Image: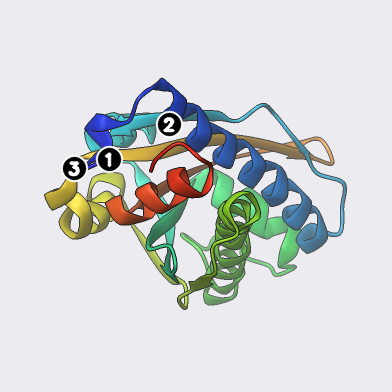
């Protein structure tokens, strides 16, 4: 029986990668509906990694990042965090929000609201991929948004889940639409009993 992320074998990790791949595909479809445009996706890079590696992949602890956190609960428990660098956050919201922000630093309240909704929908895409593969009934919390340095934003899952391991599923996504590239990252952390339930539903655990 799996007791922490360190005990995941190659088969377990392949299952989590498949969940990540399905989630990324669902996310591209959802993003296309939000933007009212055709959205392509590069092959997502899905890896099980530690928090420090995830922080470095985001540009380092001091890189300014927009994070949207969604908790999931029910027959599966954990959290999903949708992460954007500031430039990508500006790019994606400029498509959605038509406002004159010339000379304005940072993101307006309207743009933050748009990112919050995008993060919520994309988080749902990943949760739905778990539900699709396993049949587990899963609900989502209200999304929370923050703008801070990557190290500070990732301190939230570290504090909440660090006691049961320092590994997370880290997904690097690359979307493209109308000649624009939109890069984002997703961190998903499922509680150990949820990992056990997923693997059991797929016949990998007794």
Could you say which is closer to the camera, residue 98 or residue 135?
A: 135
Residue found farthest to the front: 206
- Secondary-structure class at tag 1: loop
Could you say which is closer to the camera, residue 206 or residue 159?
A: 206
Q: In front of the other: label 2 or label 3?
A: 2
Q: Residue at x 47, y 78 (%)?
A: 142
How is colour applied across the structure in the image? rainbow
Mark 3 to mark 1 CA distance (whole Å): 12 Å
Residue 86 in the image: state x and y as whole percent. 48, 48
Residue on which disc 3 sits: 165
Q: Residue at x 50, y 72 (%)?
A: 140
Q: Answer with left or right where residue 122 lies relative to residue 167.
A: right
Could you say which is closer to the camera, residue 206 or residue 183?
A: 206
Q: Earlier in the sequence, mark 3 or mark 1?
A: 1
Residue contact at pointers 1 and 2, CB within 8 angstroms:
yes
Residue 12: image tag: 2
Q: In front of the other: label 3 or label 1?
A: 1
- Secondary-structure class at tag 3: loop
Q: Can I make out residue 189 in this image? A: no
Residue found farthest to the left: 163
Q: Where 200 falls versus 10 (above or below)? A: below
Mark 1 to mark 2 CA distance (whole Å): 10 Å
Residue on which disc 1 sits: 2
Q: Residues within 10 Å of mark 2 (few under 14, many from 20)?
A: some
């Amino acid at each position: 029986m799996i007791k922490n992320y360190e005990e995941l074998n190659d088969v377990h990790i392949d299952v989590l990668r498949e969940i990540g791949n399905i989630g990324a595909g669902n996310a591209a479809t959802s993003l296309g509906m939000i933007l009212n445009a055709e959205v392509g996706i590069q092959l997502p890079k899905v890896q099980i990694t530690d928090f420090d590696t995830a922080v470095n992949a985001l540009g380092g602890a001091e890189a300014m990042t927009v994070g949207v956190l969604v908790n999931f609960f029910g027959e599966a428990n954990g959290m999903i965090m949708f992460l954007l660098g500031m430039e990508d956050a500006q790019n994606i919201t400029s498509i959605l929000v038509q406002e004159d922000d010339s000379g304005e630093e940072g993101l307006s309240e309207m743009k933050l609201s748009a990112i919050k909704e995008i993060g919520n929908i994309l988080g749902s895409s990943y949760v739905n991929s778990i539900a699709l593969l396993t049949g587990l009934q899963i609900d989502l919390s209200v999304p929370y948004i923050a703008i801070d340095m990557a190290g500070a934003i990732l301190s939230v899952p570290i504090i909440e889940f660090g006691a049961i391991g320092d590994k997370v599923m880290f997904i690097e996504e690359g979307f493209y639409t109308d000649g624009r590239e939109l890069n984002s990252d997703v961190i998903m952390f499922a509680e150990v009993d949820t990992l056990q339930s997923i693997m059991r539903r797929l016949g990998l655990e007794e």
